[in-house]
Amino acid sequence: MPIDYVKEGRIAIFTLNRPEALNAIDPESAEELSRAFVDFRDDNDLWVGIITGTGIKAFSVGADIKTMLPELKNFRGQPGAGPLNFMRGLNLWKPMIAAINGAALGGGLEIALFCDFRIASEKAIFGTPEVTLGLIPGWGGTQRLPRAIPFAKAAELLLTGKPINAQEAYRIGLVNKVVPLPELMPTAKQMAEMLCQRAPLAVRAAKQAMIHGMNVSLGDGLELERTLNDFLVTTDDFDEGCKAFTEKRQAVFKGK
Ligand code: CO8
């Protein structure tokens, strides 16, 4: 299977699993990943996702140049989420962590940018080599990268296609943390478990407010924040969070 999708308690783990092609995304991988993302989004028992790659060399080197890129001509002119675009229009508000075990290039970096947290192994590299192929990123990279890091650094990556190493990625704020490879998944799981202790509906509302808020006026963003909080104060988890604080104990959230 090009995508390994497993559920561990409240955590979903997606593993890009085509090591013979450095975990490049072919049409079958895109379809499987799309199905797994939808399952994760709709399964109430799952609260946090981790996405990683098989092997020590690559997280993912992006779209499969041999089998995926030739398809692009067939899908010209399709607005919104085309059949090859498995990250668009998902409205996935559950937190996602990218555990970047190696090269994250092109669409591989775009998958990492789709996530909220990026943890990298020391040997990981990051880049958008699409301009070397006569293309630009097509899974959100031109939009998410300049929102994630300073514009000049995004321009350097997007316009030159030259990769940067993990230390530079940390320095410019592209990744949250750099760890030795053996500590990568334990660190990602530790972060996921910490997120699972927070009120899940509040975590999702915070993500939704951040992402929508980046694209609207401050006034509209503040209104969205108010609307989300109007909903959160009606939840059982809000009552539980306040009660647990008063009783000096850890809150037990249910996502209700
Ligand atoms: N696609 C298909 N196969 C790949 C890819 C790829 N992106 N990258 C590597 N491979 C394959 C190689 O062909 C090779 O296979 P084989 O042994 O059968 O020849 C195997 O993986 C190992 O690769 P290398 O021998 O090249 O390994 P090296 O260590 O020498 O080099 C690199 C590693 C530097 C990562 C090199 O493989 C490379 O430059 N790869 C291309 C990376 C790239 O350009 N990625 C961008 C792809 S385009 C993209 O992601 C656009 C996304 C948006 C699409 C929009 C859709 C709607």
Image: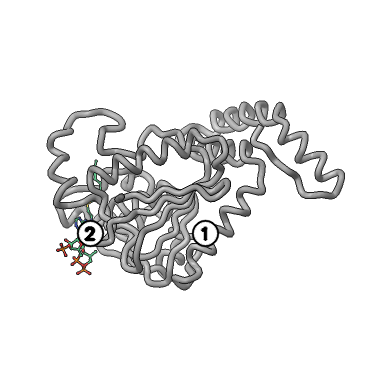
Percent of width and height locating residue 131: 19, 54
Residue at the image point whose x is 50% and y is 69% from the top: 183
Residue type at tag 2: Ala
**Label 1 neighbour load within 10 Å: few <14, some 14-19, many 20+:** many
Label 2, label 1: how far apart the Cα atoms are:
24 Å
Label 2, ligand 1: CB separation under 8 Å: yes
Image coordinates of residue 138 in percent, x first then y, are 26, 43
Q: Residue furthest right?
A: 247
Q: Quadrant of residue 106?
A: bottom left
**Which one is in front, 144 or 241?**
241
Q: Are marks 2 and 1 in contact (CB under 8 Å)?
A: no
Residue at image mark 1: 188
Question: Label 1 is placed on what type of residue?
Answer: Ala
- Is residue 84 something one can see in this rendering? yes
In the drawing, does residue 107 fall left or right of residue 72? right
- Quadrant containing the C terminus in the rendered view: top right
Residue, x 52% and y 45% (percent of image)?
95
Q: Is residue 10 left or right of residue 85?
A: right
Could you say which quadrant of the image residue 238 lies in?
Answer: top right
Label 1 sits on a secondary structure element that is helix
Dot label at residue 112: none
Residue 215 percent across, percent down from the top left: 45, 35
Mark yes or no: residue 157 visible. Answer: no
Q: How is the image coloured?
A: one colour
Q: Nearer the viewer, residue 252 or 160?
A: 252
Q: Earlier in the sequence, mark 2 or mark 1?
A: 2
Question: In this figure, which residue is indicated by the disc labeled 2?
Answer: 21
Helix, strand or loop at label 2? It is: helix
The crowd level at tag 2 (other Cα within 10 Å; few <14, some 14-19, many 20+) is: few
Quadrant of picture, ligand 1: bottom left
Where is residue 171? Give x, y as percent: 45, 66
